[in-house]
Amino acid sequence: MATKKQVKPKQEKYIYAFQNKKAEGKGSMKDILGGKGAGLAEMTNIGVPVPPGFTIITDVCNYYYLHSKKLPTGFEDQFKQSISKLEKASGKKFGDDKNPLLVSVRSGAKISMPGMMDTILNLGLNDITVEALAKKSNNPRFAYDSYRRFIMMFSDVVLGIDKSEFEEHLHKLKEQKKIKYDYEVSYIDLKDLIEKYKKIVKAKTGKEFPQNILKQLEMARDAVFTSWSNPRAITYRSINKIPDSLGTAVNVQAMVFGNMGEDCATGVGFTRNPSTGKKEFYGEYLINAQGEDVVAGVRTPQPILHLKKDMPKVFKQLVEVTSLLEKHYKDMQDFEFTIENNVLYMLQTRSGKRSIRAGIKIAVDMVKEKLITTNEALMRIDADQINQLLHPVIDPKAKLEIIAKGLPASPGAGTGKAVFDPDEAVSLSEAGEKVVLVRDETSPDDINGMNVAQGILTARGGMTSHAAVVARGMGKCAVVGCEDIKINIVKKQFTVENYTIKDGDFITLDGNTGNVILGKADTIMPEIEGEFKTFMKWADSVASLKVRANADVPRDAKVACSFGAEGIGLCRTEHMFFDPQRLPYMQEMILADTIDERKVALNKLLPFQTEDFYGLFKAMKGYPVTIRTLDPPLHEFLPKTNEAAKELSSIIGVPFEKIMKKSQDLHELNPMLGHRGCRLGITYPEITEMQVRAIMTAACKLYKKDKIKVIPEIMIPLVGNIKEFINQKQVAINVIKDVLKENKVKLDYKIGTMIEVPRAALTADEIATEAEFFSFGTNDLTQMGMGFSRDDAGKFIKIYLNKKILDNDPFQTLDQNGIGKLVAMGVLLGRETKKNLKIGICGEHGGDPESVKFCHRIGLTYVSCSPYRVPVAKLAAAQAVIEAKKQ
Amino acid sequence: MATKKQVKPKQEKYIYAFQNKKAEGKGSMKDILGGKGAGLAEMTNIGVPVPPGFTIITDVCNYYYLHSKKLPTGFEDQFKQSISKLEKASGKKFGDDKNPLLVSVRSGAKISMPGMMDTILNLGLNDITVEALAKKSNNPRFAYDSYRRFIMMFSDVVLGIDKSEFEEHLHKLKEQKKIKYDYEVSYIDLKDLIEKYKKIVKAKTGKEFPQNILKQLEMARDAVFTSWSNPRAITYRSINKIPDSLGTAVNVQAMVFGNMGEDCATGVGFTRNPSTGKKEFYGEYLINAQGEDVVAGVRTPQPILHLKKDMPKVFKQLVEVTSLLEKHYKDMQDFEFTIENNVLYMLQTRSGKRSIRAGIKIAVDMVKEKLITTNEALMRIDADQINQLLHPVIDPKAKLEIIAKGLPASPGAGTGKAVFDPDEAVSLSEAGEKVVLVRDETSPDDINGMNVAQGILTARGGMTSHAAVVARGMGKCAVVGCEDIKINIVKKQFTVENYTIKDGDFITLDGNTGNVILGKADTIMPEIEGEFKTFMKWADSVASLKVRANADVPRDAKVACSFGAEGIGLCRTEHMFFDPQRLPYMQEMILADTIDERKVALNKLLPFQTEDFYGLFKAMKGYPVTIRTLDPPLHEFLPKTNEAAKELSSIIGVPFEKIMKKSQDLHELNPMLGHRGCRLGITYPEITEMQVRAIMTAACKLYKKDKIKVIPEIMIPLVGNIKEFINQKQVAINVIKDVLKENKVKLDYKIGTMIEVPRAALTADEIATEAEFFSFGTNDLTQMGMGFSRDDAGKFIKIYLNKKILDNDPFQTLDQNGIGKLVAMGVLLGRETKKNLKIGICGEHGGDPESVKFCHRIGLTYVSCSPYRVPVAKLAAAQAVIEAKKQ
């Protein structure tokens, strides 16, 4: 149990020792021992061989600050006793000329603040002990270099002398001797250097470099306390909301050396394979070496299994100890060890980083091994990373020439010829070429090109720009908002720094990192392993929030089903109108002068829509399908260029001038806040009528032909006012009655609304009197609630993230403090009117784990996300349940 | 006191008589007598000569509906008794062949439903009484025509025979006789017609037209009950939220005739002059005539004062009676009277309609006459109409050729030559011409042209489009969103229907009606009379909500002061940058590549801004001035055309291509939700620094030079997140400290924020921890909260108003149910953090009376509106206090 915090610590105990397989503290005492100190105590107690040492508790640090850098009464005695005990445990002595004790002095707060505070290694070296170390290691160069480094480190951290003062001398020496690397400096020269260093100390401080080891230790201890309030630590705490009052502990621990002879070694390892998750001992070591030698790559380390031959006894102990650690911490461990004169010391252990694939295998295996529960397994995986399992990725071994970096909008990897025109993308693709579509930004006109591309690269737009949303929906990799690239659409090329990428040059996009890579890069397609299936089954059994998918076409619906979607939460009907076969009819409808003309055009679209919905319903096998009536402003469907307008004119026989005039009339300054959503259906009820007719006719056909009953959910977009909803509901009901009568079929249906205009959330109690379900459109709600156009906000959101004004891109992760308040209000008000109102969310946030958890907490019925994020949302939904239970 | 409603009326009393200066009911019994019945009772009781009659109470109507059109027990007796009493009181008898009683039968609900239910006049005529009437009036044509009309009206209302059946016969007759007007038909022909009418009734109903008068009366009574539930009455009640359960009363009243001889007359009048408000007897009459003769203009009526000579005794009585009515109702009355054989009857009295000018004079006079209190006077005036007193208006007497109608965006009238280009407007105006600027829509580029124009006409945009807002701010008339006109910018002309208005043709705009008038129309400039001042003083003494003005330049500030503004609630600094002298520096700043370049350009703007603010502070004489830092997106300042870009290039030496490139880079799809507001100041802190420096330097100068201390209020726009505000506040404070130090002056200042992004209202508690004041920007809040772009929504708002989806244009009148909820939430949360937080509103709604009242109710400190609406807001603020007291 953690002790209660007090400014004045108890008189009894300021220092907790860990040695001889017995520690005075334990793992749960992070409050006073800090994270590192508690960890060392824990390891010692479970029998892991850890170099002996002691921890000065955090309260001493607090006392030190509150009492003008004085220490509490009785501390000095305990400190001295602790040193004696440490000398005894290590069998070494401070200042001894044969077997001197060297220690590390490290900070360690309750919450880890990596790199923010100071550390001193090899404390205990002076003019006498350095000779002993040289003799004992039989390596004078190592000993003198350690002393040299210690003087520099101690001077920097404790005495406040800038490192550069010392490094300049080393630099000069190397120039003089014409050598390149530090390790080439001879021990003779190092001895000279040490003398120079000591002179610097004298000159700067007026005192000799302290030869008294106890003095060294006291000074180092106080320096660690002081480093708690160095500017970078204060800033770090302020950013990470760590209270200043926590204070830091100080850990004093015996140094051990793996380079004292052939019975010494050092190494690192994992208890399981961090890449595949396979249960196998994994790591590397070097005989007679220091830890940094393993990392530096000067000597080639040996695979850890060879240690069995080199030091069979120690190897056996290592396997036992690391197994113990894994069992104790119930997770795969990443460990460091040193063998000093045939004695094994564990220097560090922590949960090992692993690939998502390994993570899932390990979690599932550990459940089988009864090490953890399924709930614990589910909490081990970062839901967001699951996504990586569903897209091809760049081979991590590949060498890459990265030429630019944008936003990683849609994961996976894509390689192909750069093309700058969607039509060219289509024709090249038809000729069997792989292409990457490069655009300033994409629009619905580009859909065909995007559809055939391996990846999409845009110079503008954010994480929820058109390109990003469509790409994620298609499960296609995309890098967007890559502002460094300058596209010249006329020359069909883009430049970035010194590179010029021309039409047809190969590039590769990495949608996981946002990297744009020159040429082809190797990709791999991760397979969904057996463990993944097991894992997702567990998630499903825990989650209460349902997960649906956003899908517009049967192909997407099938993908969604295969990933376990329990329905379609959003079918955007407008995407169906961009098909080249249908677009002219849509355009004819828009260009109509009278209702009758409009109806003629709509009648041409009716059979297409009916077939679309029939296909969608059939693919979903009776699962609910929510279909949104027409949403985007009509001008999006009209040709953008003179050429396209002329072509359209020749197809549908409407004069070119009239097309241009209509485009001009429909032009809007802020289309996002313009004539779209239900505003269209209210202005032109015949559009809603056609769509509802198609939906219900398809449902009737499915019932009559396939004997499947679907409950179509008709969703009215952009409602802000109950009267808008009533208007469209009435239009729909009239058509539905007709269709059911014509088909002589009885079918249930629901008519509900998007809640995406802030006013809808504010008046959800009113709207719920008429609506049969709500679906939060958090994209638009975020746009309007924050006043961020998702097409334009990319630029300043970047700045806001840099300046820490925003913690996340609000289009990626729901802004729970602001927009979330609107959502929660909408749920509360809606359910005030209708207790069991079905409420979902169909914005991009439906696939973001943090947002999914929020949706669970406020009681939504389901989330809907792009098909490729269905497993992500499912895991997040399960984790939300487990987190709620914990509280 | 109103009696309690019961479905089954009390047995005792179903009918209330009014006759012989004594009524059984009284004015407060509207619940059972209906509005008309209660009014007749009230008039009778106070001694006004009203034709005698009786009222059947509303409960009878309800009983009638609930009991299959049966009447309550005991009703029949009361009905017959009431008829006898009426015969006695009138000295006439139903069916009498000498002196027959004729009556009107009218509906009358508690709440007036004009024209919705049925009325029958001249009931009591039959084949016998018509002869008596002919004899008595010595006017057989009148008698037979009355009978003919009665048959038609009765058949239509009671028997359900369409009027057209009868009118066809009249029509044929007139064709036969080759006459044009009804009154030319002879009484012989009318007698024939009556026979034909009776045959129609026989043919349609199988029965004779009822000759029994009692039968006629019973049938008419039931028809009035029935008309309570005719479709148009039901719709009217549903729209106006009048409960169906109210029921209607039925009023039976003796007819009187002003055309029975030379001792008869009829007339209309007002107790005061409805145009000027002067206390003078005002009206017209005709001897020996019917009421409709006065209105029809066949004979020229006499001024009412002549009646003194014609009928001195009756005239005296009329003056006495109408004075009595005015005193009783405490308001100027509009009355109708008839004199039958020297006996005066008042047929109708009601509060008279009056011009706003007359309204104020009457209200002030009546306070002086101790007829009403000042509070009652304040409630008499429609605050919105006060505006009319401050702008020139079309002479109401002028004959106008109206060619189109748009939205009345800014009141007043403007006549001038139509011009289609702002620069041409300027040059023509400099040459002494008056111009009206005609544009598809205006942008900040047009400011100079708008400034010199007499009025602004746009084809697009709503009540808060750029043209509308700027015009109202300038107090200049504007008609916007006039979609009927088709502007051809190349030919410099517009067409509307058959008219083509070319460059230089004179047109006149009526900003009060939205009319576009061909040619010059006479206008008048109403003077602010003495009573207006008195009236506004009363308003000021009652109101607690302060009223400030939105003003950007000293000229507007002076106007605001003259109208009583108590400070500036919004100074938009960007308007200052559009001045041709400054714009190039602004553009240079935008085109800068580095901070240093940007600072050089900003330094050129600094002296201009400093002088602007100095002038503004000086004009406001120490009143608080709220200055908003830069708000619009930067692309608004860049040239829109190639020519303008080339010109700019030559002025500031930046290559043309760079200017075009920058324009392209800054282009946004939804600028309203883009890089603007504090997002600019956060990206380019040096802009905020320059503006704050200008504000504080100006304040220091005012103090040092003019000894006036101003408290500048620096307002950060578009804040949605406390961190944005903290960022800009810090930037501002740093500069303020410097400026005060440099000037060696101590000055108070406030730093606050706009609440215009929905998220700001949702997190107002957080924002209030740092902000020193709030100002609700309800224009943007409405845009984002409802998802309506004010530049684009004009089109569908029109449709929404037509379809009754919206009751008001939300940019004109605050949407209290939705956006108002956000505002109220912002106030509540803000004051949770800071109890006395100063909170204002500076959207267009600050000048709308209903919105002002809402602001009072939710506890705002002040509203800020365009200078010309300051008196409107002040009156509304006073009315809000009085309304709150009443409740």
Image (cartoon, coloured by chain):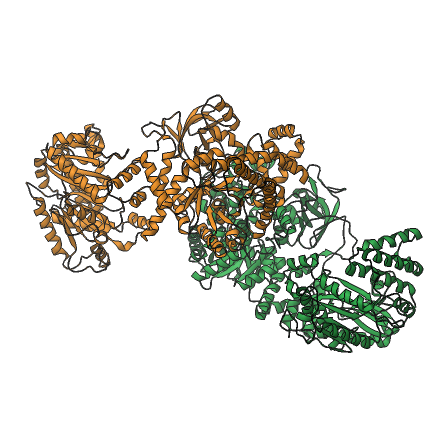
Chain colours: A orange, B green
The answer to whether residue B592 shows anywhere in this view is yes
The residue lying toward the viewer, choosing from B459 and A419, is A419
Decide which of B213, B777 is in the foreground and name it.
B213
- Whether residue B642 can be seen here: no
**Residue B651: image location, x then y, percent:** 56, 38
Extreme-top residue of the structure: A431
In the rendered view, tell whether residue A333 sits above or below residue A227: above
From the top left corner, tell me how far across and down residue B658 is, in percent: 52, 34
Front one among A16 and B119: B119
| Quarter of the rendering containing residue B261 | bottom right
Residue at point 73%, 46% (across, down): B417
Q: Quarter of the image containing the N terminus of chain B?
A: bottom right
User: Residue farthest to the left?
Assistant: A98
Q: Quadrant of residue B308?
A: bottom right
Q: Position of residue B646 (x, y in %)?
A: 58, 35
Depicted A120 relative to depicted A398: above or below? below
Q: To which quarter of the image does residue A291 belong? A: top left
Q: Is residue B274 left or right of residue A80?
A: right
Quarter of the image for the C terminus of chain B: give it.
Answer: bottom right
Q: How many marks?
A: 0
Where is A229 relative to A564, above or below?
below
x and y percentages locating residue A438 in the rendered image: 47, 30
